Amino acid sequence: MNKSVRICAWIAVLFAVSGAILLFPIGTALLNVLFILIKICMVLGLILFLFSADARRPGFILWTIASLFAVLMTILKWSMDGSRVFLYIVSIIADIGFPVLLFSMGRKDKA
């Protein structure tokens, strides 16, 4: 894994944690617990991606799936709240964009 991939992954960790802080609470207690679990899976997947050569691919897959669920949770929060549109749009772009960016950077690294 090259340096730019590592830097991008660390930025994704920062976005995942800051997104959790800024978007919490989602609404009901069940949704709050689900949101926390999704964010934990995102960070765990990124940590596996960064630090485990054996679990790099599973870590990326866990992070990507959790990111998709985070997008759904953000849309749900947005539909219930309605305000702070910029925060929701940035969160959705980050949750979709970072996995796509790292995937494309990884493909270029292998080529």
Image (tube, rainbow, N blue to C red):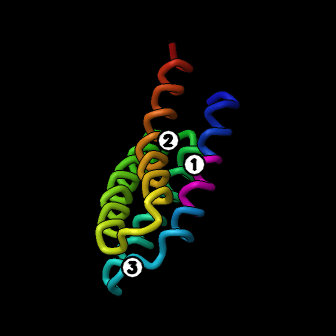
Type of secondary structure dominating the magenta stretch: helix
Instruction: Check disc 2 and report the residue beneath it.
Output: 98
Residue 57 lies, in percent from the top left, at 44, 39
Which numbered disc, 2 or 1, marks the residue that appears first in the sequence?
Answer: 1
Quarter occupied by residue 81: bottom left
Residue 83 lies, in percent from the top left, at 42, 68
Which numbered disc, 2 or 3, marks the residue that appears first in the sequence?
Answer: 3
Q: Is residue 42 magenta?
A: no
Under mark 2, the amino acid is Phe
Residue 59 placement, left or right of 8: left
Under mark 3, the amino acid is Asn
Residue 89 placement, left or right of 72: right
Q: Mark 2 touching mark 1, by CB under 8 A?
A: yes
Local SS, label 3:
helix
Nearest the viewer among 102 and 80 is 80
Q: Residues within 10 Å of mark 3 (few under 14, many from 20)?
A: some
State which region is magenta. 11-17
